[in-house]
Amino acid sequence: MVAVLTAVSTFAIKPLTLEGNFNVKKNKGAVAVYTLNWDNTQVGEIDDGVFVKGSTPIAEWLAAQDAKKIEEGKPEDANFVKDWDAIKSEADKYFKEEWNDEFAKKGLKLTHNESEAQYRFDVIIEGLDWGNLAGSLFGWGNAGGAIITGRAEVSDINTGDHIATYKINHVQGSGHFTDRFRILLVIHALIDEFDDL
């Protein structure tokens, strides 16, 4: 049993990896203007950081969810497209608040005000698995939680020089019974992974 657990942990994908030399926890006084970018996100089932059954651009996926609800005779629930902007806005606000609670006193602080920043910190969400209700209700741990992949790019505002890339290989949040909370929980998990790295 110990050998099996050791083999699994040895080959498990690291949720977040760093290419470059930039420690968000030890850059005291540093400020970065940030973006949480979902523009080109692909949606599908993700396992070990890869889509297992193909993917769909998020705008198409959201529209398909609305169409399915309408087809089922539930037009009052056809709100995926409408709700997505609110979810993104809430995730952005949550990311900044939680990040600054965790890192601002000892490391990198995030802002939307470019005039006070030395760095750009662009988080690009390339892949999204929304998770599911069944896993959230009947699973354990992170079962049913949303999964994201992508990258975070750090650059110098004054020179434009690229400093570091954080590769988001496979970050999974806790399960929850709503899509909205699963997104917030995966953003929370992403911040935890930056802290652990």
Image (tube, rainbow, N blue to C red):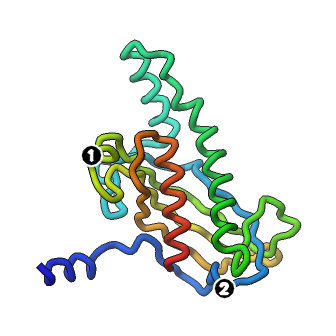
Relative image position of residue 96 (x, y in whole percent): 68, 60
Q: Residue at x 63, y 83 (%)?
A: 22
In which quarter of the view is residue 157 placed? bottom right
The residue singled out by tag 2 in the image is: 26
The residue labelled by disc 1 is 138
Task: For the N terminus, give its image quadrant.
Answer: bottom left
- Residue 129: x and y, percent? 40, 49
The residue nearer to you, when weighing 130 against 173, is 173
Q: Residue at (81%, 71%) from the top-left corner?
A: 117
Q: Residues within 10 Å of mark 2 (few under 14, many from 20)?
A: some
Left or right: 112, with 182 as reference point: right
- Specify whether 83 is left or right of 168: right
Query: Residue drawn 36% across and 16% down?
Result: 72
Q: Are marks 1 and 2 in contact (CB under 8 Å)?
A: no
20 shown above or below 94: below
- Name the kind of residue labelled 2 in the image: Lys
Mark pair 1, 2: CA separation:
40 Å
The x, y position of residue 170, in whole percent, is 41, 64
Extreme-left residue of the structure: 1
Quadrant in the picture for residue 24: bottom right
Name which residue lies at 54% across and 57% down. Answer: 187
Q: Secondary structure at mark 1?
A: helix
